[in-house]
Amino acid sequence: MWVKERIIPSGRQNIGTILSNHGLKSYDEMKFLELSLGRCSQDSLFIKKIDKLPTFVQKRTLQNITECAALENNVLLCFFADGSTKIVELDKLPDSPDLNKIKKNSTLFKSCKVGADGFFITFNDSIDIPSNVLYKYGKHIPIKYSDFISFINTNILDTADSCRKLDCTRQNLAYMAKQKYLSPIKEDVKGNLYLKGQIEKNMW
């Protein structure tokens, strides 16, 4: 909305001529913003290109989210740009109507994902929580994102890997899961994911 207030609107009567004069094949909001330097008749503000972010901005973005996961009981696992990892209990955050909606709706809670550039996490693309709030109220845990990725790479097996490990067919694997010898950590029509340790316990 801010960009649209400062550029030529797409519905301009002579937009074709304007595009041609600037060597543009199609309407591009960001290109027009760059060409006009973001100037607007309503104020004296403008934008300029910089080669490096100011130090205070770099410092601020260290609290941005790089990845997050919805755990049980309205708890979030959050990985931050500064390398820290925190457990965030929604009950510990400042109360608000939107937060209560998230806590009361498990489907909404599990829809959480990282927002643009990690400045927030969003639930169903409709309710956002700023990353600095999560950083402030989260409880630090001594694990790095790289540790988390290493665990996944080492200890999570897909259906094909599990079959090779057990030297069995997909049908055999499905039978073991149905008989509760195995408990997939994620199920999908194309195949499941299993913990390596659980697969190894069923080797004979």
Image (cartoon, rainbow, N blue to C red):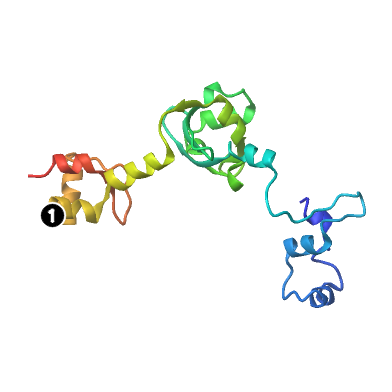
- In screen coordinates, is 17 left or right of 52? right
Q: Residue at x 84, y 77 (%)?
A: 17
Q: Secondary structure at mark 1?
A: loop
- In screen coordinates, is 90 left or right of 71? right
- In screen coordinates, is 27 left or right of 73? right
Whether residue 178 is visible here, answered yes or no, is no
Whether residue 55 is visible here, answered yes or no, is yes
Image quadrant assignment for residue 11: bottom right
Q: Is residue 40 above or below residue 118?
A: below
Q: Nearer the viewer, residue 118 or 178?
A: 118
Q: Is residue 184 above or below residue 93?
A: below
Count of numbered tags: 1
Q: Find residue 98 and report its horizontal and vertical position in percent.
A: 62, 31
The outermost residue toward the left is 204
Tell me the quarter of the image containing the C terminus.
top left
Q: Nearer the viewer, residue 53 or 146?
A: 53
Residue assigned mark 1: 168
Q: Callout 1: 10 Å neighbours few (<14), some, many (20+)?
A: few
Q: Residue at x 74, y 69 (%)?
A: 27
Q: Find residue 202 and report its horizontal and vertical position in percent.
A: 13, 42
Image quadrant assignment for residue 180: top left
Q: Nearer the viewer, residue 140 or 67?
A: 140
Q: Is residue 34 above or below residue 142?
A: below
Q: Find residue 109 and report its horizontal and vertical position in percent.
A: 50, 35
Q: Identify residue type, mark 1.
A: Cys
Q: Find residue 75 and report its horizontal and vertical position in percent.
A: 46, 29
